[in-house]
Image (cartoon, rainbow, N blue to C red):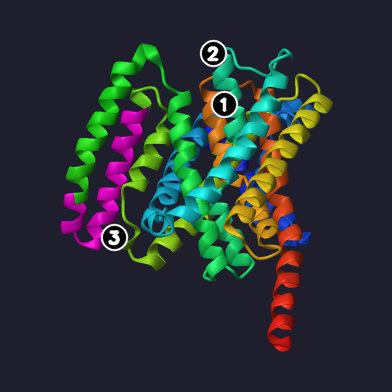
Amino acid sequence: MNTTEIFLIAMLLIFTVPYLVWRIFKTDYYAPLVIIQIIGGILLGPGVLGAAFPEYHKFVFAPDVVKALNGIAWWGVMLFVMIAGIELDLKKVWQYRRESATTASFALGMPLVFGCAAALLLLGYQGWKGAKGLDWQFTLGVGMACAVTALPVLVLLLEKLDILRQPMGQRILRYASLDDVAIWGVLALILLDWERVGRQFGFILGFGVLTLVFRRVMVRLQENDRWYAALIWLVICSFGSDWAGLHFMVGAFLAGVVMDADWFDRATLDTLFKHVLLILMPVFFLSTGLRTKWELGGYSVFFVGGLLLLASVGGKLVGVHIAGRILKWKSGEASIIGWLLQTKGLIEIIFANILLDKQIITNETFTALLLMAATSTMLTIPVVHPKLNRSAHAGLVQQASS
């Protein structure tokens, strides 16, 4: 077979296997299709399929095929991260700044502390810190990976729970939005390269100047032209960020965050988001799965994945409960909000990919983070759905008694 035919076989596996598992086993309640695709990427990687059928795996995922898949994955994740940036409504965050800042600070700070503690424990063992990672970069990187809230996946889960447009859903989005900004800021700090500090300063300065020009131009364009301008802007920012040593995904997020959502038709933006998830992101999940390794032994990777899951979920719940006490929330609200904010999914995987690209973490740490992200997201709906039902029932009982 030629490379094109093998590439199409790989694409067939990427789109067929997760969809059939999701549809046949009806996993939507505890594992939406996006989570099945993430797990599918791990199973199709060298640690599972590659170990079971090494010759077939080498044949299907030959170097030329992997290069083609990576190109699609890069473009898909750039679009996805840009849309995530556009979706951030910082005006709403500012309107409710005291409540948002208090909750976001504790919701980010506590899992960051717990995650850093877990990372410090891992530093005592070989094989977890990357070849080019300094101790502080590894510690802060793993800690922040535990603190991440996956805003795009959170939107999908809120929609599934039917609270996206309700007051609680909007509150949760505000908290997650503020954390998203902090996460990308910390990532830029971790990636700061003193050998390239001149380039990075130049990129930040150039980005600030070009943003002013870009926003003035976008306001004057018709909506159809804005989409083309947005894509050109995405490529420019991603190239500049990668050239400066910050990674192209940091530039993609910055490209989106300086755009206003009301520049675009909401229905079209939502449709683009769904199409990127449907058409391009499954390839990213597969390319991510191809990077997983179990060379330190499956048990070690699973143990570390469990440790990071405990730090992530436990830290998020502790932080949100502290915020709930300070802000005097109603009984049960902190638990619901905490479980929803601990959702990891795509942003955590993107974050981990960047740490791996920069060799701050090893493939084994990356695999553990991937397992943590998939498990934390799978826990969300089964835990939150009964809590919401009890909360709604309690509200109805209180109304009836009054």
Q: Where in the figure is residue 239, as x and y percent of width and height?
A: 33, 31
| Residue 168 visible in the picture | yes
Disc 1 crowd, CA 10 A, few/some/many (<14, 14-19, 20+) = many
* Residue type, label 1: Leu
Q: What residue is shown with label 2?
A: 132
Contact, mark 3 vs mark 1 (Cβ under 8 Å): no
Compare marks 3 and 1 and give the one earlier in the sequence. 1
Dominant secondary structure, magenta: helix
Q: Is residue 247 above or below residue 386?
A: above
- Measure the C-alpha gap from mark 3 to mark 2: 41 Å
Disc 3 crowd, CA 10 A, few/some/many (<14, 14-19, 20+) = some
Q: What residue is shown with label 1?
A: 140
| Residue 27 visible in the picture | no
Instruction: Point out the residue furthest to the right here.
Output: 299
Instruction: Give the magenta-colored segment's residue range.
Output: 216-241
* Quadrant of residue 33 within the rendered picture: bottom right
* Quadrant of residue 394 within the rendered picture: bottom right
Q: Residue at x 37, y 11 (%)?
A: 195
- Measure the C-alpha gap from mark 3 to mark 1: 36 Å
Compare marks 3 and 2 and give the one earlier in the sequence. 2
Seen from the viewer's position, the closer of residues 301 and 103 is 103
Q: Where in the figure is residue 9, as x and y percent of width and height?
A: 62, 41
Magenta-drawn stretch contains 6:
no
* Residue type, label 3: Trp
